[in-house]
Structures are given as C-alpha cells and as structure tokens.
Amino acid sequence: MVTWFWQRKRPAAGTLKLRSRGDFGDVRRVDFEELAPEIDTFLGQAAYLQLGYFETLSALIAPTPELASKESLSRAAGAALAKHQALVAVIRERGDEALEIMLPFREPLDAFRRATHGARPLETMLSVHLTAGMLDDFYLALSASYASTGGTVAAILRQDDDRQALAAIITDAIAADPEWRSLLALWGRRLVGDTLLIARGALRSQSLDAAEEKRVEPVFTQLLAAHSRRMAELGLDA
C-alpha cells in the first residue's frame, strides 16, 4: 500500500515557504525551477481551474433561495471569471491560443470538480472555498519559476476572490443548525487528497526521487497547514 507524504508524520518545514498574499518574495525559486511544469501547462491549468470554479459557483445560484446568498455566490463567481479572463489574456499575449492551451487539462480537471462536488450546495461551496484556496497557494508558489510572466500570474491570483462570502454562508448555516458542523468537517477532510493530487500532478515529473521529494514536501506541508487554518476559521476541525 502506498503511503503518500502528506499521510506521514510531517517534518518541520524547511527554507521553502509558501508566500503570503502580500509577500511574493518568500518563495525560494531555486527549489521549484527544475520541477515546475512547462509554462503552457502552468498557464493552461491555472486558467481552466478558474473557469471551473466560475461554472460551479454559477450553477449554485439558481437553487439557492436566499437573495443575499445568491448575491454572495454571484460575486465569488464573478471573481473567478475575472481571474480566468486575466489568465487567458496572459496566454494570448504570449501568442498562444487559449483554448488549445487549456484543452489538455479539461478532462482531468473536470474529473476533479466532479470528485469534489458535494451532494448538497453547502458541501460544494465548502469545496470551492477550500480547494481553490489550496490550489491558488500552490500556483502562487509555482509562479516564482516563470520570471515576469509568473509575476503577472501571481498578481492575478492575489486579486480579491470574494470567497469569504462563501465562508459566511457556511458559518451562518452551522450557527443555524449545528449538525452541519460534523458533516462539513468530514467533507472538508475528504477534499484534501484529491486536491493535493491535482497539485502533485502539475509538477514536471510524476516520479520524484528522494531528493526531489525532500524539496517539494515543505510546500505541500504548508498547503496542509493553510487548509487547517481555513477549516479552523469556519469552526471545523481539519
């Protein structure tokens, strides 16, 4: 049975750190350059992920009865669409066709969205809040490997995502009915494996040697730590 590194006891993080939203310089570029994917892969995946979040959030608007919640969902969907469009603009500025760059990732990323789509709207909102947070952080870490283009992508990903509106809907639901707490806590834990596999699959090599595993493990450890903080902010146990 394979034991993934995020299932093992986690060592203390090394020098490689996920950058905070306000401090792009914290990522040690040298640790990721050899493992970062080709720039077309980086841009295609990042752009299609944002399009997927827009689609998921938009689909939640109609079955949501409360007007305030509809408005919150529309803002979060609009933010995802704005990021998608900005990433598409980056692709086009490089002289590439955005649809061609995104197409290879449509099938795996659609499968990821299906796997993390909840049976209930609140579960799906939690999926977007948590998985988008983890993957935005991961792509911000990768962006340091792509010079000025990476800096542009980082600026796009740092834009306001309005996902705190989703968090407010979730916490309000828990306050109204505490039974949501255990259900959503379990769902939040289930999201981790699928999300980390998407991040791991973005790396240039799918078969890392021991030295390469050691270089990337601190990044994934910090992704998990950020996930735990998001869960705690919602009043859920990670």
Image: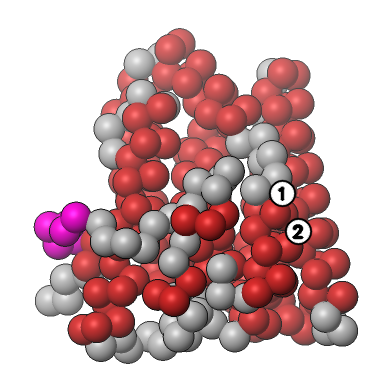
Residue where numbered disc 2 is placed: 84
**Magenta stretch: residue 11 in it?**
yes
Give the magenta part as a residue range.
7-12
Question: Is residue 98 or residue 143 the one in the foreground?
Answer: 143
Residue drawn at the location 55% of the way across and 22% of the way down: 168
CB under 8 Å between discs 2 and 1: yes
Q: Residues within 10 Å of mark 2 (few under 14, many from 20)?
A: many
> Where residue 36 sits: x, y (%)?
50, 79
Residue 122, position in %: x, y?
Answer: 51, 33
Name the residue located 81 percent from the left edge and 59 percent from the top edge. 86
Where residue 99 sits, quadrant-wise, is bottom right
As helix, strand or loop, the secondary structure at mark 1 comes to helix
Q: Quadrant of residue 38?
A: bottom right
Please provide percent x and percent y for residue 3: 16, 71
Residue behind mark 1 = 80
Give the amino acid at mark 1.
Answer: Ala
In the image, is residue 165 part of the stretch drawn in magenta?
no
> Is residue 155 placed above or below 94 in the rendered structure?
above
Horizontally, residue 21 falls left or right of residue 101, namely left
Decide: few, some or many residues near mark 1? Use Cα within 10 Å; few <14, some 14-19, many ≥20. Answer: many
Of the pair 176 and 130, the residue shown nearer to us: 130
In the picture shown, does residue 43 fall above or below 176?
below
Q: Amino acid at mark 2?
A: His
